[in-house]
Amino acid sequence: MKKIINILLSLLLITGTSGLLQAGTPGFEFLRTPVGARASAMGGAFVAVPGDVHDIFYNPSGLALVRQRVGAFSYLNNVLDFQSGFIAVAQPLPGLGTVGAGINYFNYGEFTKSDANGNELGTFGAGNLAVNISYANSLFSRTNAPEPDAAVLNNIHYGVSLKFIYSKIDQYSSTAVAADFGLTYETPIQGLVLGGGIFNVGKSFSPFIHTKETLPLNYRFGFSKILAHLPLQISVEGYKYRGEDFGFAFGGEFTITNNFFLRFGYNSIGKNQKIGISNDKFAGISFGTGFLWKDYHLDYGFTSSGAIGNLNRLTVVKNF
């Protein structure tokens, strides 16, 4: 049993929890793990939900609609008690756009080091880190047009994130650099936003041992819509990782009051997490809540990963 646990831990360290059951995936798999309780509760369908500081991760162009300086801290209690989190800040610059920065980290803790004969040789640690620098601005705007066009939203926003990526297992480490490119379009249809982009475009500069790992390059496109006669924002997204089949995600956010929100979602990655046991029937399903208290947003998100386990995220967002 101890050998099985050690093998499982090794797989998690190398491939990341979200790619555990997928063969042939690239390296730096922690970059696939959603950040933020709000977005994860909505199934990760967040590429077309602008104006949130977590757009640093999901679509940097969405930062163009951040109206004031905002900071956020997210904590994820991962499977097997791995610790991870996301820290971010965004600052609008009048007339110049919006800048943002984020740190995404994973700490896998300490493990027993053994030789080929099972003799213990001490302990070792492992972790991942990604540092993002983002910029977003508006390409074209008609929000100040005269009537009857004043009510027509016809804005296009663009954004880019540059990231430095570092992974370490014991004395071995690997580094990479990458970029994300995104667009957001506020359509003339009230409440309808389109968003898309290409993510993790880059390369590894140093291998763990000999082989340089590829990054999880992916393409995403989706839309969000605030319904006219129901206090609900829906979001739908399709995505494609290099060398994998198409996936999809959808989610929703009910505005119960101005200070209380309910969220739900589903991500098709859940079908890859099912192994035919009763515990995996809810794989891919997520839900959560949000509270607004003074200048603080307090969010909780729950995601079922089937037999792998359940993920609980907590996020604190503050405008200042």
Image (cartoon, rainbow, N blue to C red):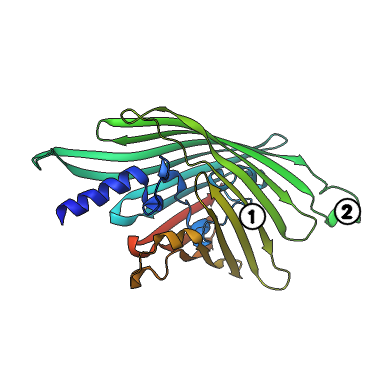
Q: Quadrant of residue 108?
A: top left
What residue is at 60 percent from the left and 56 percent from the top? 237
Instruction: Give the residue pinned by disc 1.
Output: 222
Q: Position of residue 166 (x, y in %)?
A: 39, 33
User: Is label 1 in contact with label 2 (beta carbons under 8 Å)?
Assistant: no
Q: Earlier in the sequence, mark 1 or mark 2?
A: 2
Percent position (x, y) of residue 179?
A: 55, 35
- Foreground pick, 186 / 173: 173
Q: Is residue 131 visible?
A: yes
Query: Mark 2 sits on what residue?
Result: 149
Q: Residues within 10 Å of mark 1 (few under 14, many from 20)?
A: many
Please provide percent x and percent y for residue 315: 46, 55
What secondary structure is marked by label 2? helix
Type of amino acid under label 1: Gly
Can residue 68 be seen in the rendering of this structure? no
Location of residue 161 (image quadrant): top right
User: Does 267 sit above or below residue 279?
Assistant: above
Mark 2 is on which residue type?
Answer: Asp
Picture quarter containing residue 94? top right
279 or 31, which is in the foreground? 279
- Where is residue 211? Give x, y as percent: 36, 30
Inter-mark Cα distance, 1 to 2: 25 Å
Please name the residue shown 15% across and 57% down the image: 1
